[in-house]
Amino acid sequence: MRMIILGLVLIAVTGCSSNGLTTLKQIDSNFEKEIVMTNDPEQTAQVRSIVTNWMVNNGYNVSKETASPNAELDDDQVMFEFNANWWWDMATYMRFVNLDVTDNKGNKVAELDFDSVRYGGFDKFGNAEERLNLIMEVFFQKISVQDAERQLENGKDKSLKSAPTCAYDC
């Protein structure tokens, strides 16, 4: 019986989490097109604000207007779609992040998939805003994947604040 309890405690402590990019095609470092954000009502205003503020603060041209994912774009525009999913495991945490950028012809320019539950540990319980900012820095080639992983491992995003209090997609 003690072995069963010890095994359950070990599983609970180690969890099944990590910081992991599962797909990465970065935006060209010379990127200069206007970014049009999708107006997907399924996404939280908090995530949209973090992502948009990061782009504006880093000198990217973000349209003040949003559009549906299949809207017609000008030659100098790209569509930026994002998805962030929240899960619950003792506390809420950002489980998945998906970023897709397509040009005006529907061709994928860049994409990123992040899954915080890829390895073992408590790394999934990080600060959502700092984690999203690191993801954006990698996506736009401001820092390397290795630098982002080092920052995540060293706890730059480990505070539990900023996570919404809903589970799954919010």
Image (tube, rainbow, N blue to C red):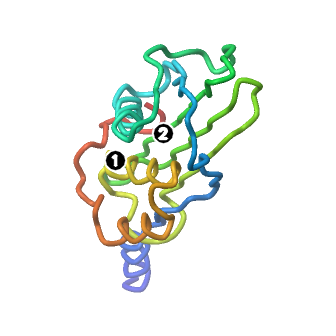
Element at label 1:
helix
Q: Position of residue 119 (x, y in %)?
A: 52, 69
Q: Is residue 170 left or right of residue 106?
A: left
Q: Which mark is residue 84?
A: 2
Q: Residue beneath label 1, please?
A: 128
The residue depicted at 51 percent of the width and 47 percent of the height is: 96
Which badge, 1 or 2, comes first in the chain's sequence?
Answer: 2
Q: Position of residue 92 (x, y in %)?
A: 34, 46
Badge 2 amino acid: Ala
Residue 94 sits above or below residue 71 on the image: below
Q: Is residue 131 left or right of residue 74?
A: left
* Crowd band around label 1 with a 10 angstrom C-alpha radius: few (<14), some (14–19), many (20+): many
Q: Count the marks: how many? A: 2
- Which quarter shows the N terminus? bottom left
Badge 1 amino acid: Ala
* Image marks 1 and 2: residues in contact by CB distance under 8 Å: yes
Q: Which mark is residue 74?
A: none
